[in-house]
Amino acid sequence: MSAAEQPVAPGLAVEWLGSVPYGEALALQDAAVERRRTGGPDRLLLLEHPPVITLGRSARPENLRRSRAELAAHGVEVFEAARGGDVTWHGPGQLVGYAVVDLAARGTPDAHAWLRSIEAMLIEALGALGAPARALPGMTGVFLARPGCDGTPLKIASIGVGLRGWISFHGFALNATPDLRGFDDIVPCGLAGVRMTSLAEALGEPPTAALFTRARERVADAFRRRLL
């Protein structure tokens, strides 16, 4: 077993992979799903992506604010993703978690319950970091507990999953320390009345590597506690 792969609970492995191009991450997830199908552990793959926009199964063309040619000229890739949800952006400073979990083996073959569970784990982690957060009815994802000064919901994490049989893949993107201008090219998750925020912004702290590491550790802890 590699040093990066550490079983921390029965049937669960958490791995930090660093910065991984989106196409490579898709291949890693495919391999992880097949390994799980043949008896491997549930896994949480934690990583960052270079700038990329992904389109979920519900994505609408108008939620891309720039053409693909313009995005490519600025070094931003665009991928169709086999997950639920609309459009999102990934980039440095954003903690991405791909959860490869056999829901049927856990006795919870319910996609909606799994989404709520991911929300709960992220809310737990953000609370531990000093950024109280919540879920909002009818909106998948995690929002700061307090809205903006104008009442606009502040979204700090996006969630979108896919299923093969009852093995989940894809997962979440938590804005720890990213440059939020990356979201200017899209209507995030198709929600026009929502503003994206970050952990650094919520805490009023500089977007440092140390803060990103704290976020990564607290998220890993939350998954460890709940995915036993």
Image (spheres, rainbow, N blue to C red):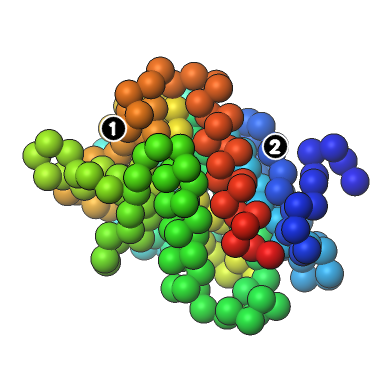
Residue 66 disc label: none
Residue positioned most to the left: 150
Percent coordinates x, y for residue 44 in the rendering? 66, 52
- Closer to the N terminus: mark 1 or mark 2? 2
Closer-to-camera residue (155/73)? 155
The residue under label 1 is 184
Residue at the (46%, 37%) spot, across then down = 129
Percent coordinates x, y for residue 109 in the rendering? 57, 80
Depicted 24 relative to depicted 104: above or below: above
Q: Quadrant of residue 168?
A: bottom right
- Direction from residue 151 to residue 138 in the image, left or right: right
Q: Is residue 83 visible?
A: no
Q: Amino acid at mark 2?
A: Leu
Percent coordinates x, y for residue 58 in the rendering? 36, 62
Q: Element at badge 2?
A: strand
Q: Element at badge 1?
A: helix
Residue at the (90%, 46%) spot, across then down = 1
Q: Amino acid at mark 1?
A: Asp
The residue under label 2 is 17
Q: Could you tell me if the residues under marks 1 and 2 are in contact, i.e. CB atoms within 8 Å?
A: no
Closer-to-camera residue (182/117)? 117
Residue at the (68%, 65%) spot, across then down = 228
- Direction from residue 90 to residue 225 in the image, left or right: right
